[in-house]
Image (tube, rainbow, N blue to C red):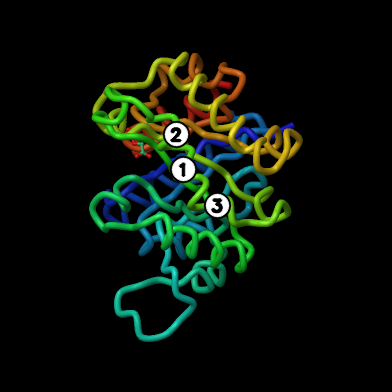
């Protein structure tokens, strides 16, 4: 049985005080209300990881993610944060290749493949993001485009390492726009991607890989989207900034 996961990507939002309040509310609600077979992850800004990790750590089904990390191990890279630093403060997951990183910081699949490696070497779980733009969705070949992001970003991994990766399909046209992929569109892409994983790693490993949906997922549409057979949870942006709504999403399996 593959893992059900709901991850909240806070992006560049919240002051320290606000972040502490949000995290402690989420932790309490998750403890009291969310089934223990659902893994709930928060991804606050890097600055707050050390403090907030202390809130999430005691809760067995919670994790804490960085939104990015360097593709380099250490050294003279001013402003960067390494995977080993994240590991040393108890970070469990790292979001790799979010479309905003690809778009605004020109991250290539090649760099992302290096980031995936370094996250795995440090014993954390990469949440590898993929997804097509609106222009691509309106044209031809967008299934193949998303598959190629996986091929170039994670298909160099051994089967053993591949088994540790979580995938997030996030159509760019649905991120922060209020436009959600329909549950049928999400299922269609997720099933296609699972087939792509199976063609490389075999059906058994493909069936064990969690594929999350992201893009304007909220407490109203999560149940319908998560009920699709190939959707294993969500990567939640805007709706993860409110503890009640985020917890309701985690409860919608
Ligand atoms: P959104 O963002 O839920 O605000 O659309 C999702 C994401 O970017 O991970």
Mark earlier in primary sequence (3, 1):
1
* Residue nearest the viewer, comparing 201 with 170: 201
Q: Position of residue 37 (x, y in %)?
A: 68, 33
Q: Tell me the quarter of the image containing the C terminus.
A: top right
User: Cα distance, mark 2 to mark 3?
Assistant: 15 Å
Q: Report the side of 58 relative to 175 (left or right).
A: right
Q: Quadrant of residue 194?
A: top right
User: Cα distance, mark 2 to mark 1?
Assistant: 6 Å
Q: Mark 1 — residue? A: 148
Determine the secondary structure under disc 2: helix
In the displayed orientation, state which residue is furthest to the bottom.
Answer: 76
Q: Position of residue 96 (x, y in %)?
A: 45, 53
Q: Mark 2 — residue? A: 144
* Residue nearest the viewer, comparing 37 with 110: 110
For label 2, count other residues whose C-alpha is less than 10 Å away and answer few (under 14), some (14-19) or many (20+).
some
CB contact under 8 Å: marks 2 and 1: yes
Q: Mark 3 — residue? A: 154
Q: Tell me the quarter of the image containing the N terminus.
A: top right
Of the two numbered discs 2 and 3 in the rendering, the one whose residue sits closer to the viewer: 2
Residue lying at 65% horizontally and 50% vertically, measured from the top left: 162
Q: Report the side of 236 relative to 18 (left or right).
A: right
Q: Quadrant of ligand 1?
A: top left
């Amino acid at each position: 049985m593959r893992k059900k996961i709901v991850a909240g990507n806070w992006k560049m939002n919240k002051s320290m005080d606000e972040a502490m309040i949000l995290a402690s509310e989420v932790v309490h609600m998750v403890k009291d209300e969310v089934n223990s077979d659902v893994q709930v992850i928060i991804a606050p800004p890097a600055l707050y990881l050390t403090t907030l990790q202390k809130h999430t750590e005691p809760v067995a089904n919670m994790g804490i993610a960085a939104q990015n990390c360097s593709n380099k191990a250490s050294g003279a890279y001013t402003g960067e944060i390494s995977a080993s630093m994240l590991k040393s403060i108890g970070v469990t997951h790292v979001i790799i290749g979010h479309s905003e990183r690809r778009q605004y910081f020109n991250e290539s699949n090649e760099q992302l493949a290096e980031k995936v490696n370094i996250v795995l070497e440090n014993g954390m779980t990469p949440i590898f993001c993929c997804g097509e733009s609106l222009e691509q969705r309106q044209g031809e070949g967008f299934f193949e485009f998303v598959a190629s992001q996986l091929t170039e970003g994670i298909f160099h991994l051994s089967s053993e390492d591949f088994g540790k990766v979580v995938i997030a399909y996030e159509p760019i046209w649905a991120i922060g726009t209020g436009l959600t992929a329909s549950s049928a569109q999400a299922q269609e892409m997720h099933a296609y991607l699972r087939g792509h994983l199976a063609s490389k790693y075999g059906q058994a490993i493909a069936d064990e890989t969690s594929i999350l949906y992201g893009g304007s997922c909220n407490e109203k549409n999560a149940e319908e989207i998560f009920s699709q057979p190939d959707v294993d949870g969500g990567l939640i942006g805007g709706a993860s900034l409110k503890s009640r709504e985020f917890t309701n999403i985690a409860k919608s399996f």
